[in-house]
Image (cartoon, helix red, strand yellow):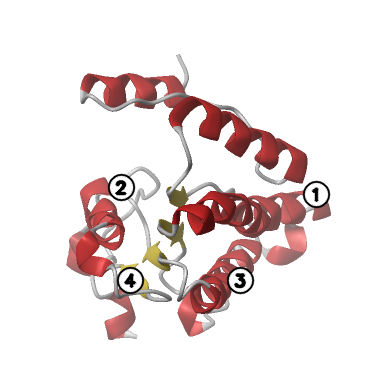
Amino acid sequence: ESAAERTVESAVKQGVNATAIQADITDPDSVDSLFRQANETLGPVDILINNVGDFDPRHWEEIEWNAWKKVVETNFYGTVLCTRAALQSMREDGWGRVVNIGFADSDQLYSNPENFPYFVAKTGVLMFTRMVASETQDAGITVNAVSPFAVENTASDVSSFPRGRAATFDDVTAPILFFLSDDAAYISGENVGVDGGRLAER
């Protein structure tokens, strides 16, 4: 049973109409098909959370070019393609919410030789977030980013982390839900770091 199917089952149990659609978010035709199926099955897409992306923790000189491309394509190109597809129905409806998942250090132009393609891609995601936010000001659409440092399912040694732990899923979903709510209707182009105060220590 796939993670997508388990998510659908969980959503249905909570009374949500849900379906799982497989797509390659780095391929424009596949993304167009994804949103066409979603629109036909669930109705016009008015909320988009871009939360797909690979990473490679190796030193940048050790990463094969295909692996480099995969990290950038899934994190950045996928965000661009999915957002472009979703904006069509959002503009027609005059309402929409886009939340992009970044990385806590990306807006600081943080550079590290390990996992460098990921940092590059996530920095691009934040720039893209602000650009699209500026273009959709009069369309009833908000575009924001939520940027965690390390999340509980990816962190092993947390002894040096702020507060002695990684972010929980609830820590990350809280600002996402806020950006989706009516309370955030006047907020767009912003980025919320979910890092336990890590950047404040630097």
Q: In which image quadrant can residue 99 be found?
A: bottom left
Q: Nearer the viewer, mark 1 or mark 3?
A: 3
Q: Which residue is mark 1?
A: 66
The disc labelled 3 sits on which kind of residue? Gly
- From what the image shows, is residue 9 above or below residue 185? above
Mark 1 residue crowding within 10 angstroms, few (<14) / some (14–19) / many (20+): few
Q: Does residue 91 show up?
A: yes
Q: Are marks 1 and 3 in contact (CB under 8 Å)?
A: no
Residue drawn at the location 45% of the way across and 53% of the way down: 93
Which residue occupies 43% across, 20% down? 5
Q: Nearer the viewer, residue 188 or 56?
A: 188
For label 4, the residue is 192
Image quarter in which the N terminus is found: top left
What is the distance, in whole Å, between disc 1 and disc 3 at their CAs?
A: 19 Å
Earlier sequence position, callout 1 versus callout 3: 1
In three-dimensional space, the C-alpha distance between marks 2 and 1, rounded to whole angstroms, equals 28 Å
x, y percent for residue 57:
58, 56
Q: Residues within 10 Å of mark 2 (few under 14, many from 20)?
A: few
The one of 161 and 143 positioned closer to us in this rendering? 143
Number of the front mark, 2 or 4: 4
